Image (cartoon, rainbow, N blue to C red):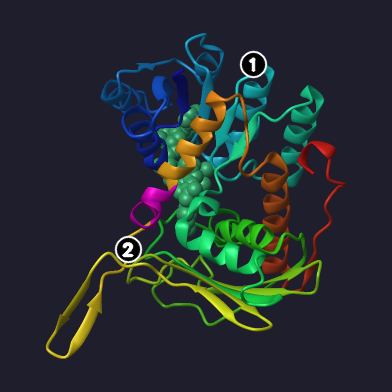
């Protein structure tokens, strides 16, 4: 059985997902796309043998579409995911599930009312082989009891439209999800610590920033987010346990050794670093759908991540620690 996918938003990651789903993933094809940039949508549709539709709803309601990928800007996700639930179509929604916790709860309410899962959120790091090694070491006791973690999230540069809160909602939201997933606990408090700004960051962006995430079980995670580090894309994670440490370094494709020096390449951006990971994420989504199963990061994970990111933005504004208050987790997500 081939899953016919419709893709909403054919920008950077949407176009990449179309390529993966139409030519690399086993068991899927792309039949319809939509983007407000019509020329771009038509070009991406043509590359996949799909049709460019006139609206997001036309994609979702298309009888030739079995499942939907949402890769539009984050503030449109809630409305588009709700339309997928109404049409009873499984949806892989790129992060964030929604830009406010309130909107995430509307989505959860709609999904819970149907009595089953339709939504997977695009927290792809859970599919990365490096992160899986870290997760296994935490789960199987290799490093004893996991006590704390240090994470780094650096982007070479960001566009002018990027703001200080986006460092939380767009970038650190990945570390928020990884933290919840690795430790199997909710984050109860977050604090953003000001640091000396880089002279190369735009005046309106506080960069770098340090974020503290406190867990329900007492653990603490430090995240350095630096979105104008200049030298490349650098994502790292180290979990400190009671008897050992497990580290995910920035992987490198090549090492050049000469003149008494070892030089390693640094990934240029998230497309390079996580290219294979997005493919695994999509393959597992499609494989699950072919057996009628929706798994992976859930709407609850999307809600919890957005709620914590919202508190991080509040802490960024106030300079004070901000407690995270989540609603009770519905049985569908236990
Ligand atoms: P982008 O700006 O390159 O693409 C967004 C596209 O959506 C654009 O082509 C734009 O024209 C289109 N669009 C705007 N309004 C629309 C509408 N009403 N309906 C349909 N399409 C519309 O952005 P991007 O970098 O591709 O990011 C898209 C989403 O993917 C964001 O939510 C982002 O956070 C997420 N993302 C996730 C990762 C990851 O690592 N998981 C990486 C990059 C982006
Ligand atoms: C982008 O939207 C992503 O999700 C990338 O994974 C992240 O590294 C980047 O900072 C975000 O802007």
Percent across and percent down for residue 323 are 82, 65
Q: Is mark 1 within 8 Å of ligand 1?
A: no
Percent across and percent down for residue 270 are 40, 55
Residue closest to the eye, 298 or 54: 298
SS of the residue at dot 1? loop
Q: Which residue is mark 2?
A: 267
Percent across and percent down for residue 55 are 49, 18
Residue closest to the eye, 149 or 320: 149
Question: Residue at the bottom extreme?
Answer: 260
Quarter of the image for residue 134 reads: bottom right
Which numbered disc flags the more N-terminal residue, 2 or 1?
1
In the displayed structure, 100 sits above or below 114; it is below
The residue depicted at 77 percent of the width and 41 percent of the height is 333
The residue depicted at 56 percent of the width and 31 percent of the height is 288
Label number found at residue 123: none
- Verify whether residue 26 appears in magenta: no
- Verify whether residue 271 appears in magenta: yes
The residue depicted at 63 percent of the width and 44 percent of the height is 297
Helix, strand or loop: magenta stretch: helix
In the displayed structure, 233 sits above or below 246; it is above
Quarter of the image for residue 330 reads: top right
Q: Which residues are magenta?
A: 270-277
SS of the residue at dot 2? loop
In the displayed structure, 93 sits above or below 161; it is above
Q: Which residue is mark 1?
A: 87
Residue closest to the eye, 271 or 55: 271
- Which image quadrant: the C terminus? top right
Contact between marks 2 and 1 (CB within 8 A): the answer is no
Residue closest to the eye, 293 or 188: 293
Decide if residue 118 is on the left or right side of residue 128: right
Percent across and percent down for residue 34 are 44, 23
Can residue 11 be seen?
yes
């Amino acid at each position: 059985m081939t899953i016919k996918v419709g893709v909403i938003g054919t920008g950077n990651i949407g176009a990449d997902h179309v390529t993966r789903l139409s030519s690399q993933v086993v068991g899927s094809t792309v039949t319809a796309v939509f983007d407000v940039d019509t020329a771009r949508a038509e070009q991406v549709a043509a590359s996949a043998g799909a049709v460019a539709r006139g609206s997001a709803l036309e994609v979702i309601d298309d009888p030739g579409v079995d499942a939907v990928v949402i890769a539009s800007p984050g503030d449109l996700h809630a409305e588009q995911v709700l339309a997928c639930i109404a049409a009873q179509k499984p949806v892989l929604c790129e992060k964030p599930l929604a830009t406010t916790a309130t909107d995430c709860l509307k989505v959860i309410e709609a999904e819970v009312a149907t009595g089953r899962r339709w939504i997977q959120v695009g927290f792809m790091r859970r599919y990365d082989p490096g992160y899986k090694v870290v997760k296994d070491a935490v789960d199987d006791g290799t490093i004893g009891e996991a006590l704390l973690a240090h994470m780094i999230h650096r982007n070479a540069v960001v566009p002018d439209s990027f703001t200080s809160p986006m460092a939380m909602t767009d970038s650190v939201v990945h570390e928020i999800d990884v933290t919840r997933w690795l430790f199997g606990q909710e984050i109860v408090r977050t604090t953003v610590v000001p640091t000396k700004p880089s002279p190369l960051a735009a005046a309106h962006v506080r960069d770098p920033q340090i974020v503290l995430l406190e867990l329900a079980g007492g653990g603490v995670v430090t995240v350095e987010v630096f979105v104008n580090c200049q030298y490349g894309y650098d994502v790292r994670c180290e979990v400190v346990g009671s008897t050992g440490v497990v580290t995910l370094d920035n992987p490198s494709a090549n090492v050049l050794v000469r003149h008494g020096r070892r030089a390693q390449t640094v990934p240029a951006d998230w497309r390079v670093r996580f290219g294979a990971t997005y493919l695994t994420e999509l393959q597992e989504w499609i494989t699950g759908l072919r057996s009628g199963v929706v798994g992976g990061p859930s709407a609850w994970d999307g809600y919890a991540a957005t709620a914590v990111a919202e508190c991080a933005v509040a802490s960024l504004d106030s300079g004070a620690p901000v407690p995270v208050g989540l609603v009770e987790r519905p049985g569908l997500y236990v």
